Image: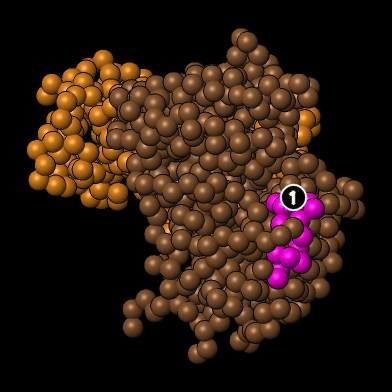
Chain colours: A orange, B brown
């Protein structure tokens, strides 16, 4: 049996429901996806519940499941994966938070949760924070730059808890929250003290930064505070290779996906033009995936644009993003040149009319180079998937990929 | 509600994929199965993942699941079931291995892994081994004859581990492996010492056996060594009757299936002409199943020929084996004469073009004497099953059989 390489294409928030402006069709139903539909002719197809029927996944929990790790066991919160995605090296027991640079007034009321969004000074400010704040109450503190106005904070020290509240009030016009422990555990209290003290010191550093003085002169909101959220504790998870025998990589422009991949020991690649937005360069991502497939057994090609369009309620842009994914798939096939297993799916549904993740199942197809029994589906979309033979969960996906690539270990004899 | 008796027909490795020499159809799609298709008219039908989607089952793990026992809890390795199938009575803590009589040269290099295959002296040699080797390092040792060149070895003693390597090098031209512990547990080391010593003593007995001198005179390879593998430890499992209230039996010619049935307290029957091969007598097996059904509530009718054809890549012979299964089903119905629940399925797929078990789902139908909602399927095969309503796992099968035979206990009130 020849072993095939595996390409897993995930359109973030791909699944949808009928949309009025699309004539009561879903974006997948409207999109022209010639490359995907050609692969569909020799595929298993159906519906996948990323976590379980009706459960609304985040992109983080869902990607863990798609990569074979039960998020109920292995998901410890978003902070850890954001920090890994921002380049942090974590050790067992480190506590990580994600956050924003934001703007507060003198009463610590949040005026702008994103300090004007495209914060060009973010890298410099992170550097200043790292130089000025190395340790807080005996705990080592590191800051990492995220995308735009985002950052990650890592606390390293003994006996740190992670069950603590966010300092981010999640709304403008409200005061910064003090971090409060969510349990009576001493360790959570300790983490809160560190977070509150580092928030105070960061505010001092930022308020006095020359960069913020410059911003104010330019009429821009100063990035004078950190809003932190999603505290979570790092613990090592089993690598993809240890569980599947496959060496893997991913092509993505999204920090949290990079972080999850790093936790599973998958290399991340972000080729030129890949943005994580609607303006991403699909052909560049497809070429990169083909290039990486030459070295690796498994490549996750992740596209965020579908989810971005959904959250903004942009039906036609979601159709375009799907057609972009189809072009990326075509580009992989043309550039890689060899037969391979290609799975196409979403990490969850984000119905455009809801503008939010939903617990709906997502369409899934797995193309196999070996001949498969024909399914009665000619276009890859929610309606076709309902007629397909698969009805699985995200955690089943990795076993299916191993099966159709002739890589599965036999259980028993 | 009248309680029906239950016939479960398992074609080993039944499921398949489209095959070129069959005009891109599967063996089930090509086979004429009039008896089965007649039953199909009042059946539930669909796909079953014997273990879980994408998981490649062995026949042993799958049969445990089909008989209602989760193999992740109850499968301890092949040796135990082979030994039970060869007639061993096991006690809690016994360690069993399966093995071959084989031929080694003076340097212990394996020249023939099967000592020429049809080893007519196997029964005599097993007897000699039992007479000469009763105990090794304080551990009781028993040998049991398997089919052809195969045997099982059972070690009875305190503190025996089962996490040990095979002595079978699994390839000719290699030296016999010493048994090595797979953990640092004292008990595994102890088992290894016993296995290595019994291997040495068995070699001595066999080398000096008159039977082997005779073989060599006839120009046949001497059966002068044991190749052992699949060490596993016996622990009692709950009987079928204790879980379902059904008294059961099976009709099979395959040792490991007999072993699994024995573990579950199902009687095994191998009628005249049943061989476990392509030459098996399907009508004889059908008649035997009908006879046994008069005494029992549940009969498993197992046919190995479908799997044998698949492993050898013989598409047309697999079609013939399926038509043989259909004849066996017809023979049961004619001879039994009463209405009964009849389920037809496979324990796994063995696609002819892969020549190996795969993790594909298998078609499943359950015929019920009571009227059921019609399914849109007229021939029992992979394509029809994809359109059916069932999408279940092996572990669900026993509950389904209890339901359609009006034997299910109510859960709650």
Q: Is residue B308 left or right of residue B128?
A: right
Q: Is residue A259 left or right of residue A21?
A: left
Q: Position of residue A374 (x, y in %)?
A: 78, 56
**Does residue B275 show up magenta in the picture?**
yes
Q: Residue at x 74, y 58 (%)?
A: B273
Say which of A125 and A370 sits in front. Answer: A370
Q: Residue at x 13, y 21 (%)?
A: A138
Whether residue B273 is situated above or below residue A207 in the rendered picture:
below
Q: Residue at x 61, y 67 (%)?
A: B8
* Classed neighbour count for the residue bearing mark 1: other residues with Cα under 10 Å, few (<14), some (14–19), many (≥20): some
Whether residue A13 is situated above or below residue A191 in the rendered picture:
below
* Residue picked out by circle 1: B277
Whether residue B179 is situated above or below residue B303 in the rendered picture:
above
Residue A245 falls in which quadrant of the image? top right
Looking at the rendered structure, the number of numbered marks drawn on it comes to 1
Quarter containing the C terminus of chain B: bottom left
To which chain does the residue with label 1 belong? B
Say which of A261 and A330 sits in front. Answer: A261
Q: Position of residue B224 (x, y in %)?
A: 62, 22
- The span picked out in magenta is B274-287
**Does residue A129 show up magenta in the picture?**
no
Q: Position of residue B74 (x, y in %)?
A: 42, 50
The answer to whether residue A294 shows anywhere in this view is no
Q: Residue at x 42, y 32 (%)?
A: B134
The answer to whether residue B119 shows anywhere in this view is yes
Q: Is residue A322 left or right of residue A119?
A: right
Query: Which residue is situated farthest in the front direction here?
Result: B210
């Amino acid at each position: 049996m020849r072993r095939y390489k595996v390409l897993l294409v995930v359109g973030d928030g791909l699944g949808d429901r009928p949309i009025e402006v699309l004539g009561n069709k879903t974006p997948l139903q409207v999109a022209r996806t010639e490359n995907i539909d050609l692969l569909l002719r020799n595929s298993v197809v159906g519906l996948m519940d990323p976590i379980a029927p009706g459960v609304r996944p985040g992109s983080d929990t869902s990607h863990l499941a798609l990569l074979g790790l039960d998020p109920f066991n292995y998901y410890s919160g978003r902070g850890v994966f954001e920090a890994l995605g921002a380049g942090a090296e974590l050790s067992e027991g480190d506590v990580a938070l994600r956050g924003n640079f934001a703007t507060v007034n003198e009463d610590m009321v949040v005026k702008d949760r994103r300090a004007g969004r495209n914060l060009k000074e973010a890298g410099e400010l992170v550097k200043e924070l790292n130089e000025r704040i190395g340790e807080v109450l005996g705990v080592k503190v590191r800051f990492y730059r995220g995308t735009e106005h985002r950052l990650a904070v890592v606390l390293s020290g003994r006996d740190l808890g992670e069950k603590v509240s966010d300092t981010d009030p999640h709304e403008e016009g409200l005061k910064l929250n003090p971090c409060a422990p969510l349990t009576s555990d001493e360790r959570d209290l300790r983490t809160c003290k560190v977070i509150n003290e580092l928030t105070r010191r960061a505010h001092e550093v930022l308020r006095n930064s020359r960069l913020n003085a410059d911003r104010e002169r330019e009429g821009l909101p100063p990035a004078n505070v950190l809003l932190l959220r999603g505290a979570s504790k790092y613990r090592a998870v089993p690598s993809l290779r240890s569980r599947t025998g496959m060496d893997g990589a991913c092509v993505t422009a999204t920090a949290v996906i990079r972080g999850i991949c790093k936790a599973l020991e998958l290399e991340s690649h972000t080729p030129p033009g890949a943005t994580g937005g609607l303006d991403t360069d699909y052909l560049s991502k497809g070429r990169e995936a083909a290039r990486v497939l030459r070295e690796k057994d498994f490549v996750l090609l992740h596209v965020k644009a579908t989810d971005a369009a959904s959250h903004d309620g942009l039906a036609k842009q979601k159709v375009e993003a799907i057609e972009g994914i189809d072009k990326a798939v075509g580009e992989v096939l043309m550039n890689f040149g060899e037969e391979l297993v290609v799975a196409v799916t979403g990490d969850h549904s984000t119905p455009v009319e809801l503008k939010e993740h939903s617990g709906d199942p997502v369409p899934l197809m797995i193309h196999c180079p070996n001949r498969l029994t024909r399914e009665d589906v000619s276009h890859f979309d929610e309606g076709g998937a309902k007629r397909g033979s698969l009805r699985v969960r995200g955690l089943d996906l990795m076993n299916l990929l191993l099966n159709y690539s002739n890589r599965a270990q036999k259980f028993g004899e």
